[in-house]
């Protein structure tokens, strides 16, 4: 029986994705550390946003850390994001990678025709995942055979929706971390029933169908496999399971209401000042000549982090009456289009969802706020999701 191999099939790096903070060497070091703790990770695939690193050579890092580093691509289509593996020049020549609404049937067909394979990315996520387009638009799945159902950046409910879609339509499923930072790599993996050492091996392994998504905890020797999620068993508001206790008092009418909370004028000077403050050296942001002649966008763009400099008003308040302590529980950034000098970015915030879960400290309420950033042409350039936790801290008995 062939030895299994474990790969993270969805990783972004500072070499090719402007919203990523993880370096390729940093990812290799992280894998080394995970192996020292008993986990099994053989390699990863760089699936940069709208950017294929055709001239990148990672052979020295691969040899130094004994990690297989492959290259793919993440592009945007009219049914959400798509991962492409085994990318060839012929495929790249057929599409404008900066287009955020490529015809999905053309992408899946072209990948197959040019010796590669396409996979629906983070399939359970709203808007940028496949499930929503199947449910609302009844799109055809005729050319889609594999989806990413176990995604490290998606909630259990979102992943559950993807697995349910796969089960209902006979689709194969992979796992990937969707890592933008070093510590996220490897959270979700794909286990292959073969050794994968090249982009060609990866395509062959995916076409074979002999693979499955796993969590990194599953790769330890003797580990009991995790139960993969199903949306049928998870409340849509949370993905965290049924809870007891009294209903939380809140203003439910605030959930889903999107309001304008502020604007940001982006200029060459504001980009330069932001980059100087953060010691940012990416020529895409600071070198006008390089950005115009070598960059993928025809000129300087702004780092997505510049959106953090906008002074925004508070958004809708669900007025949750629970707990006596709150804290920030994480932020997720998605980028859709480049931010350019001269843009005026408007911010719109909504309370996306309110859900509960239980932890070691007891019952907690999570409030997820989504802020959508749109330019003067009405094009969404980015979105952030911020989670706040509210909990009741019980007084200790004397």
Image (tube, helix red, strand yellow):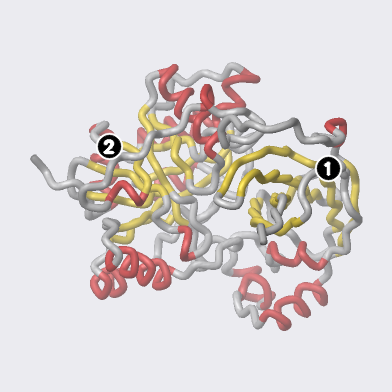
Which percent across, then down, holds residue 116?
A: 34, 40
Residue 50 against residue 281 in the figure, above or below: above
Dot 2 falls on a residue whose secondary structure is strand
Image quadrant in which you'd find residue 192: top left
**In the foreground, 12 or 190:** 190
Identified at 61% across, 27% down, the residue is 132
Q: Between tags 2 and 1, which lies in front?
A: 1
Q: Quadrant of the C terminus?
A: bottom right
Residue 27 against residue 153 in the figure, above or below: below
Q: Is residue 119 left or right of residue 220?
A: right
Residue 382 seen from this side: no
Q: Is residue 90 left or right of residue 337?
A: left
Label ID, residue 321: 1
Q: Which residue is label 2 attached to?
A: 211
Which percent across, then down, holds residue 198?
A: 25, 54
Dot 1 falls on a residue whose secondary structure is loop
């Amino acid at each position: 029986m062939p030895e299994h191999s474990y790969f993270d099939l969805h990783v972004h790096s500072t070499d090719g994705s402007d919203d990523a903070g993880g370096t390729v060497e940093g990812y290799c070091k992280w894998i080394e550390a995970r192996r020292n703790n008993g986990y099994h990770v053989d390699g990863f695939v760089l699936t940069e946003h709208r950017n294929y690193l055709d001239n990148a050579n990672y052979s020295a890092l691969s040899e130094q850390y004994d990690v297989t580093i492959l290259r793919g691509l993440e592009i945007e289509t009219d049914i959400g994001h798509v991962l492409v593996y085994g990318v060839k020049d012929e495929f790249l020549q057929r599409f404008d990678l900066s287009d955020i609404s490529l015809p999905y049937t053309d992408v899946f067909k072209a990948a197959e025709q040019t010796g590669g394979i396409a996979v629906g990315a983070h399939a359970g996520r709203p808007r940028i995942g496949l499930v929503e387009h199947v449910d609302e638009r009844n799109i055809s799945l005729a050319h889609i055979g594999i989806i990413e159902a176990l995604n490290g950046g998606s909630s259990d409910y979102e992943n559950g929706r993807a697995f349910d879609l796969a089960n209902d339509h006979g689709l194969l499923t992979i796992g990937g971390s969707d890592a933008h930072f070093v510590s996220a790599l490897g959270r979700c993996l794909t286990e292959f029933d073969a050794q994968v050492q090249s982009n060609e091996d990866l395509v062959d392994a995916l076409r074979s169908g002999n693979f499955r998504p796993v969590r990194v905890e599953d790769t330890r020797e003797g580990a009991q496999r995790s139960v993969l999620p199903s949306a049928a068993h998870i409340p849509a508001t949370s993905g965290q399971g049924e809870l007891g206790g009294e209903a939380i008092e809140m203003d439910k009418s605030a959930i889903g209401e999107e309001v304008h909370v502020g604007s940001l004028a982006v200029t060459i000077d504001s980009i330069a000042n932001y980059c100087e403050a953060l010691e940012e050296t990416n020529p895409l942001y600071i070198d006008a000549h390089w950005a115009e002649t070598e960059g993928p966008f025809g000129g300087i763009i702004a780092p997505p982090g510049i959106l953090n400099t906008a002074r925004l008003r508070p958004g809708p308040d669900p007025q949750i009456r629970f707990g006596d302590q709150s804290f920030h529980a994480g932020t997720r950034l998605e980028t859709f289009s480049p931010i350019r000098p001269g843009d005026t970015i408007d911010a719109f915030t909504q309370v996306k969802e309110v859900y509960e879960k239980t932890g070691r400290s007891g019952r907690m309420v999570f409030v997820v706020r989504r802020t959508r950033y749109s330019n003067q042409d009405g094009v969404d350039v980015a979105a952030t999701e911020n989670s706040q936790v509210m909990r009741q801290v019980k007084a200790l008995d004397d």
